[in-house]
Amino acid sequence: MNNTKIYTIASADEGSAQLAEAAEILRRGGLVVFPTETVYGLGGNATDSEAAQKIYAAKGRPSDNPLIIHIAYPEDAADYAEISPLYLRLAEAFMPGPLTVILPKKDTIPHSVTGGLDSVAVRCPAHPIAHALIAAAGIPIAAPSANLSGKPSPTCAAHVIEDLSGRVDVIIDGGNCDIGLESTILKIDGDHPVLLRPGGITLEQLEAVCGPVEVAAAVIGQLAPGERPLSPGMMYRHYAPSTPLTLVRGERGAVTAYLAARQAEGCGILCYAEDAELLSPERCIILGHRDSPEEQAHHLFTALRDADALNAPHLYAPMPEESGMGLALCNRMLRAAAHTVIEL
Ligand code: AMP
Ligand code: MG
């Protein structure tokens, strides 16, 4: 495409001149990668069909997989979507932050951005650089994760450069993403909330605000062949390292013994910090402490990218608990493992 410019920015204030340039590039229909608190986003003007097409092309993403619209302020959603009292309650509780809400679309957003759907996904990021860029651009920014389609989402600029150098106009390097997993996606049909993707806001946090939340079957379950999920993105192989990954579920000691045996056979292992001393440091990547799914989430996508460099024939990892942030970890790891789980 062109030469990608890389702007390294320590803070929104220090980088204000570069952010103003990037905002102008977005207004003129260009593509800018920016950091958010979840993962890096590949941004373009959400009101411009051509910009949307450029995003799909740069990512190699199928164009029936809709994009999330990023806004500077929660109330801006009313310009692009039919908002409801439930949206306002969620916005009050969780925005700005790692929550995406799916609402009926207004005509200001072209169908090319929403994969032909009459709904639109809206998010208001909390990261100061993302906020400053969107506010300076003065337009809504369509931004999927800034990885090549199928690869783990990028949580630092090095991952973005690996995937998208030469395919976008600007990459803003703002350091590592705090959360490391993508936003929670909640669809609201009137006052009925459905969780489509778990993420930085947990199911428990949502239920404290909305009451009972339906969890879409595809969050943990496997789709039947030919079945179409509520969120088109759940259809695709995702987050996967090139090396096949198997998850191991069972009692702690049994899982660690199983991982040690596979490691001794030459396989690569993802494990918890507490179990590392029972394993050899060779071909072993530590996800984080056992009782901190937040720490594991922060490291997961880097671990999946690094796992390929182990040059192992196969990877094994423990299956996380399904509560709190663990539900988001399970969702990403099950996809990375193509739902291959061994029960001990
Ligand atoms: P990413 O852009 O990589 O964070 O992925 C965005 C996810 O949001 C994908 O799984 C999309 O399928 C999903 N998504 C975006 N817009 C909608 C929508 N209008 N309805 C359902 N899912 C959506
Ligand atoms: Mg993605």
Image: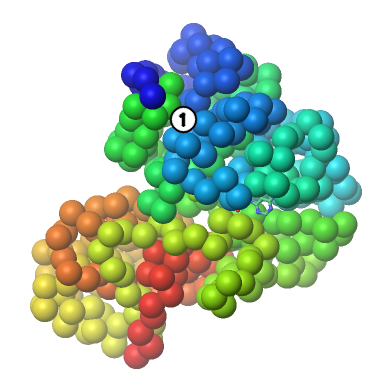
Q: Residue at x 28, y 59 (%)?
A: 242
Image height check: is 238 above or below 109?
below
Q: Residue at x 44, y 66 (%)?
A: 335
- Left of 22 or right of it: where is 107? right
Give the amino acid at mark 1: Val
- Left of 113 or right of it: where is 236? left
Q: Residue at x 61, y 17 (%)?
A: 27
- Left of 68 or right of it: where is 157? left
Q: Nearer the viewer, residue 107 or 244?
A: 107
- Residue 45 appears at what percent x and percent y? 62, 26
Q: Nearer the viewer, residue 148 or 317?
A: 148
Q: Residue furthest bottom?
A: 344
Q: Nearer the viewer, residue 29 or 257?
A: 29
- Residue 341 appears at what percent x and percent y? 39, 80
Which SS class for mark 1?
strand
Confirm whether residue 88 shows in the render. Answer: no
Q: How is the image coloured?
A: rainbow
Task: Mark 1: give few (<14), some (14-19) or many (20+) Cα within 10 Å.
Answer: many
Residue 288: name its quadrant: bottom left
- Give the quarter of the figure containing the N terminus: top left
Residue 246: name its quadrant: bottom left
User: Does mark 1 have its CB less than 8 Å from ligand 1?
Assistant: no
- Residue 76 appears at what percent x and percent y? 77, 31
Image height check: is 117 above or below 160?
below
Counting every numbered tag in the picture gives 1
Image height check: is 336 above or below 148?
below
Confirm whether residue 61 shows in the render. Answer: yes
For disc 1, the marked residue is 33
Q: Residue at x 35, y 84 (%)?
A: 342
- Residue 140 appears at what percent x and percent y? 67, 28
- Give the quarter of the figure containing the C terminus: bottom left
Image height check: is 229 above or below 159?
below
